[in-house]
Image (cartoon, helix red, strand yellow):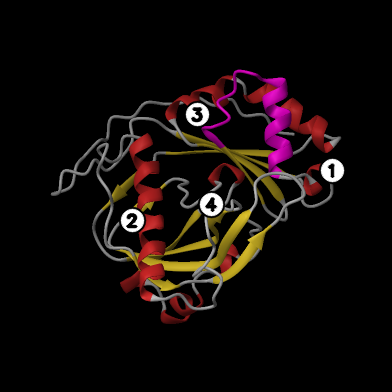
Amino acid sequence: MQHAMLDVERVGAEGRDRQGIQKTSTAMQASWSFLHRGETALANMETYDLRQSIKKRFPDWPHFEVTARSSKGAMTLSARTPAAATWMAENMCQVMALIAAQAQRPLPVFPNLVTPGMSSTGRHLYYIRTLMVARARRSVPWDGWLTEELNEDKRDELAKLIADGISIELQRWSVLVHGRALSGVVVTDVGKPMPIVPSSGPRGLARVGVKFIAPWSIDGDVFAGQHTLMGYGLVRRGGEVDKTPAVVAAGLIDMAQEEII
């Protein structure tokens, strides 16, 4: 297994666009992907259980600032704040050892560093594999979310859920000024309704396969919707509209087919 030590580097490229939006963060976002390839105990482990095992071993870990998400071949931890990225860098080897114990064997791990940022030029395609739109609470009705198609009010609510979620994410990295909200999200596919009922962890209702266009481009892992700490709501980029072949834009994003959440 290849070990790689991470430094949370500070960068100075902070440019602003004409609207005064800061374009890049001053901190690096850290993500680690542990490759189990569906062949270890980790492949059948719920993200909630993994988070609990890390919390038990490391009481000081910023568990409200790190997302765990699962796919068919990997389990990925992503920092959601600069402080979480620093903690991950300082505790990488210890966490790797814990994950290896959970998997019952050492695993290849791929660390990734990216500078969160955005630009407000061009129109860009985005895809969210599983967007959690409602929590499993009696006080939060699912009426209106369960239909194949959504009425105009629900489509507007879906667009606002996405824009608000991404805005909060970018504010955490100081890319957006606190209180600023993104606009211009146009939902092109509302997805399909699906109740999310894992064996452990939070439950709720999701829209699966949501697609939208926005007049800005973002860098880094950002999330939208409910229960994002479990990996739901990861925003995938699909390219600039005017530069993306029509066949790709229509199917928007074969690259996400293997993602579970």
Residue named by callout 2: 217
Distance between the Cα atoms at labels 2 and 1?
37 Å
Distance between the Cα atoms at labels 3 and 2?
22 Å
Which is nearer the N-term, disc 1 or disc 3? 1
Image quarter where the N terminus lies is top right
Q: Is residue 64 magenta?
A: yes
Secondary structure beneath dot 3 equals helix
What amino acid is found at the position of numbered circle 2 in the picture? Ser
Residue at (84% x, 35% y) in the render? 105
What amino acid is found at the position of numbered circle 4 in the picture? Ser
Which is nearer the N-term, disc 3 or disc 2? 3
Please state which of the two labelled residues, at mark 1 or mark 4, is closer to the viewer. 4
Residue named by callout 1: 41
Marks 2 and 3: in contact by CB < 8 Å? no
Q: Position of residue 162 (x, y in %)?
A: 40, 56
Secondary structure beneath dot 1 equals helix
- Residue in the foreground of this view, choosing between 2 and 12: 12
Residue at (52% x, 71% y) in the render? 191
Q: Which numbered circle lies on residue 85? A: 3
Give the magenta-colored segment's residue range: 47-66
